[in-house]
Amino acid sequence: MLNFSAQRDNESDTHRMSSKPSQPQLNERAQYLFKVLVERYIEEGSPVGSRTLARSAGLELSPATIRNVMSDLEDSGLICSPHTSAGRIPTVQGYRLFVDSMLKVRTLSVSEIRKISGDLDPIDDAKKVMEKASTMLSEITSLASIVMLPRTEHKALRQVEFLPLSDNRVLAILVINSREVQNRIIQTSREYSASELEQAANYLNHAFAGKDLNKVRDKLLSEMSLVREEMDQMM
């Protein structure tokens, strides 16, 4: 159990944690209490009060002393109170400080590395890889996990295919960039045969394969407008 003497109330910041210039610097006691508060909140998901923090931290400090430390942490923008008389929760700035300076990263074991290498098949499409990565990350950390693809500015059409469905619906399958596959269901005004859909897909693949999706859309809308004008003139 840690035991901080009363003299530390007035001690200077001799033992300050190393942090970015924009992050507040904490003495040893404040740093420890803040770390315990964040871990407790992550574990239980509810605001942490001074008494709960004292029990979790295992420090021989009075509730008033802990409240003073929590008040200083709140003034530093690291924690906040969701409403009056509630406990404290970490802020975005507090999470950033916790991740950058207090979180310890465990080295993966050989078996975990082998599992990751074996389960994540680069041949799979992006959606399947994300599902596997999320499941694997959750199993390794025993926590909930979210995996997101980085935003890509350029999306090139590689291939498109149309499949007829019931009730005047068409399934559009688009292959974008290297291996990203997206499916869309289109509601049409009439039923289209497999032959008609194949002809439409062949035209799009021949005319627009490798081109940016936004440019493909603009080109199609332009051609549709031109054809409509020609039909109006003929009529």
Image (tube, rainbow, N blue to C red):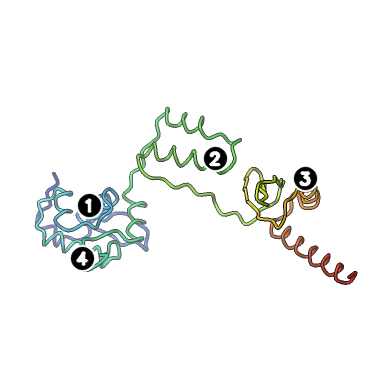
* Tag of residue 198: 3
- Element at badge 1? helix
Q: Amino acid at mark 1?
A: Tyr
* Tag of residue 71: 4
Pick whichever of labels 3 and 2 is earlier in the sequence: 2
Pick whichever of labels 2 and 1 is earlier in the sequence: 1
Relative image position of residue 179 (x, y in whole percent): 64, 43
Q: Is residue 32 left or right of residue 121?
A: left
Pick whichever of labels 4 and 1 is earlier in the sequence: 1
Residue name at image x 22 percent, y 65 percent: 72
- Element at badge 2? helix
Name the quadrant containing residue 144: top left
Residue at the disc numbered 1: 32
* Pointer 3 with pointer 2, Cβ within 8 A: no
* Pointer 4 with pointer 1, Cβ within 8 A: no
* Tag of residue 182: none
Q: Is residue 16 left or right of residue 233?
A: left
Q: Is residue 50 above or below residue 134?
A: below
Pick whichever of labels 3 and 1 is earlier in the sequence: 1
Q: Nearer the viewer, residue 129 or 116?
A: 129
Q: Amino acid at mark 3?
A: Glu
Relative image position of residue 217 (x, y in whole percent): 72, 60
Q: Amino acid at mark 2?
A: Lys
Instruction: State the CA–CA distance, disc 3 to disc 1.
Output: 65 Å
Mark toward the viewer: 4 or 1: 4
- Element at badge 4? helix
Instruction: State the CA–CA distance, disc 4 to disc 1.
Output: 15 Å
